[in-house]
Image (cartoon, rainbow, N blue to C red):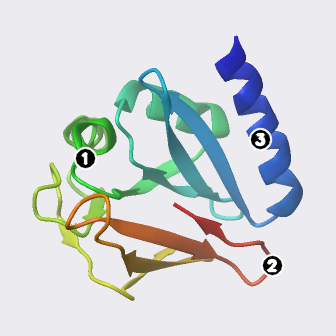
Amino acid sequence: FVCEERQQWMRRVLNKVIERMNVVPVPVHQDNYAYLLIDRATKKAAAVDPAEPAKILEAAEREGVEITHILTTHHHWDHADGNPGMVEKLGESLKVVGGDKRIPALNHLVVHNDRIQIGSIDIRVLFTPCHTTGHVLYFAETQEDTPALF
């Protein structure tokens, strides 16, 4: 119940500052979140750290979006182990992005300042080797919206 209230609160806050892109928090495991980063105009989306594929796919269906990318911040199981299941469900054309070759199902290795496009959302990769040696952050922005950082 508390998790559901927190998720609703996060949606209200995020939807106030974001118009073109939408960020949907998806609770995974007991104390973590994955996210759908959605371009509202094209209905294209990226799944950020989709540790539990069924939950991410359910959220995507509810939002009516097509997941074209997985953005993986680091290789730990609670962030990356859902990647193979996502590829299995969505197909080999799904881009699995990350900055570390240890990321399961990785097919798009990125480095600092690389750019990724999801509809009109421009995503810049920031190499941040703190939590793990291959950790990256994703800075997402459009011309209209407040940026988001994952």
Q: Give the number of the disc on residue 91.
A: 1
Residue 27 position (above or below residue 14): above
Which amino acid, mark 2? Answer: Glu
Density class for disc 2 (Cα within 10 Å; few <14, some 14-19, many ≥20) is few
Of tags 3 and 1, the one toward the viewer is 3
Is residue 119 shown to the viewer in this render?
no
Q: CA distance from mark 3 to mark 2?
A: 18 Å
Of the pair 82 and 75, the residue shown nearer to us: 75
Residue 113 position (above or below residue 123): below
Find disc 2 in the rendering and name its residue.
144
Seen as rendered, the residue at the extreme bottom is: 113
Of tags 1 and 2, the one toward the viewer is 2
Which amino acid, mark 3? Answer: Arg
- Determine whether, in the image, residue 15 is placed left or right of residue 136: right
Q: Of marks 3 and 2, which one's residue comes earlier in the chain? A: 3
Find disc 3 in the rendering and name its residue.
11
The residue located at (83%, 48%) in the rendering is 13
